[in-house]
Amino acid sequence: MRQALSELLQQQSLQQISVQKLTSTAQLTRGTFYLHYKDKTDFYEQTEQQVIDEWFATARTVIAPEGKSMSGFSLGPALRYVDRHHQILTVLLHPQFTQFRPRLQQRFERELLAFSQQLPATASEGSPIDIQITFLTSAFLGLVEHWLNDNRRYRSEFLAQSFRQLATPDVTPLAAWFALSGTDIALHSEKSLT
């Protein structure tokens, strides 16, 4: 169904897509569709939530800053997920899907806030926690959107390492949540696949 949605949105607007067009493109019956979804709005909402949940499940890792185990966000697997699912993410990040980006942003903010509550009180000495959360969320999502709009010109591993180089725990303590685990190349001057 996600593939069908991606294909249809290349030719028409979200409002022009009917359940019939979706099921026909996906080669499913309408009955099968209605077994899982109330209507196309329900399909869109469930798809958005599934993508967010899958992305965070893929990126979940355990980190141990200062020897204490905490939940983190592994950049390598997270960006490989974006790479593998670039079509649906590009679709969902389009302005036609008015709820996806805010939901995604709220999830990042919630996860970063939970992480911040496990850090020592000194984590907010430089900048308040809410500013750190806003900065990191906006920076990461902006980078992902730019990467998708730029046809994923850089390797996911390079992008992960570049992000961590720009958002370091030395400058912003909450940046430690974005773990470099799962990357398999060293940061060097090779920036592009092309």
Image (cartoon, rainbow, N blue to C red):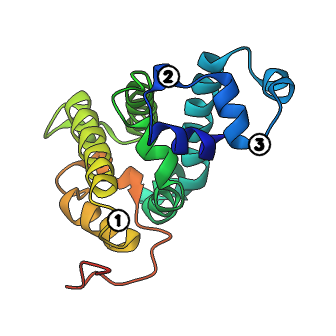
Marked residue nearer the N-terminal end (3 or 2):
2
N-terminal-most mark, 2 or 1: 2
Mark 2 Cα shell of 10 Å, populated few (<14), some (14-19), many (≥20):
few
Q: CA distance from mark 3 to mark 2?
A: 18 Å
* Above-or-below relation of 192 to 56: below
Q: Which residue is mark 3?
A: 27
Mark 1 residue element: helix
Q: Amino acid at mark 1?
A: Ala
Pick out the residue farthest to the top. 38
Looking at marks 1 and 3 on the same chain, the residue that comes earlier in the sequence is marked by 3
Taking the view exactly as shown, the residue that stands out farthest to the left is: 126
Quadrant for the N terminus in the image: top right
Amino acid found under the numbered disc labelled 3: Gln
Q: Where residue 95 appears, x then y in whole percent? A: 33, 28
Whole-angstrom CA distance, mark 1 to mark 3, is 37 Å
Secondary structure at numbered mark 3: loop
Dot 2 lies on which element?
helix
- Horizontal and vertical percent for residue 96? 38, 26
Mark 2, residue position: 16
Q: Which residue is mark 1?
A: 160
Coordinates of residue 137 in the picture (x, y in percent): 30, 39
Q: Residue at x 59, y 54 (%)?
A: 58
* Residue at x-position 43% and y-position 28%: 13
Does residue 21 appear left or right of residue 76 in this picture? right
Q: 30 or 67, which is in the foreground?
A: 30
Q: Nearer the viewer, residue 45 or 179?
A: 45
Q: Which quadrant of the view contains residue 49?
A: top right
Which amino acid type is marked by label 2? Gln
Residue toward you, 145 or 90: 90
Give neighbour class at mark 3: few <14, some 14-19, many 20+ (Cα, 10 Å).
few
